[in-house]
Image: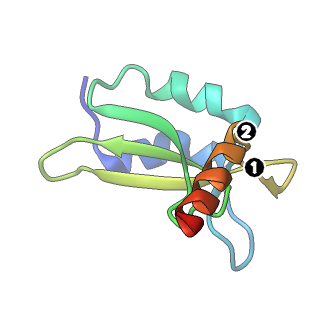
Amino acid sequence: MKAYINEIKKKIAPYVHSAFLDREYINEQDLPVVRILLRPFSNVKVSIEKTRQDDGHLDCVISVDAILGGGTLRYEIRDNGRRKKYYDPLAWIDEIEKWDALFF
């Protein structure tokens, strides 16, 4: 079954929240429910990515592949009202590479 972006918005509307002067967000505990709701659609892909600003926070990205009604929806992921921070246990390797590039 295929879906359009407007159908997806209506389907996940109870799980999307908004704050004054802030982006729309989905609570972390609602992500499994959103995935289950969108599973029947063959042209919808749900993924979790770092924000476009690469500030260490996470976004829920819903991509809809359709000729006329396709697009991408991006929502912040929050936990108890706070933005969810991305933690990379191997980030220290990137820092070492930056210093190596500076001196060599």
Residue at the bottom extreme of this rendering: 21
Say which element carries label 2.
Answer: helix
Q: Mark 2 packing: few (<14 Cα in 10 Å), some, or many (20+)? A: some
Query: Residue at left 68%, top 73%?
Result: 22
Taking the image as shown, residue 44 lies to the left or right of residue 51, namely left
User: For the residues marked 2 and 1, what is the alpha-carbon distance in whole angstroms?
Assistant: 8 Å
Q: Which residue is the extreme one toward the left?
A: 67
| Relative height, residue 29 to residue 22 (above, below) | above
The residue lying toward the viewer, choosing from 21 and 88, is: 88
Disc 1 secondary structure class: loop
First-in-chain label (2 vs 1) = 2
Three-letter amino acid code at disc 2?
A: Glu
Between 45 and 10, the residue placed more toward the observer is 45
- The residue under the point 67% across, 55% down is 95
The residue located at (57%, 32%) in the rendering is 34
At a point 66% along the width and 52% down the height, the residue shown is 96
Q: Give the vertical position of 39 relative to 86 (above or below).
A: above
Say which of 87 and 92 sits in front: 92
In the picture, which quadrant includes the N terminus? top left
Q: Position of residue 94 (x, y in %)?
A: 61, 50
Residue 99, horizontal then vertical, whole percent: 64, 61
Contact (Cβ within 8 Å) of mark 2 with mark 1: yes
Describe residue 87's horizontal placement relative to residue 51 as left or right. Answer: right
Q: Amino acid at mark 1?
A: Lys
Kindly identify which residue carries mark 2: 28
Which label was assigned to residue 84? 1
How many callouts does the rendering have? 2
- Is 66 placed left or right of 3 in the picture? left
Residue 66 in the image: state x and y as whole percent.
18, 43
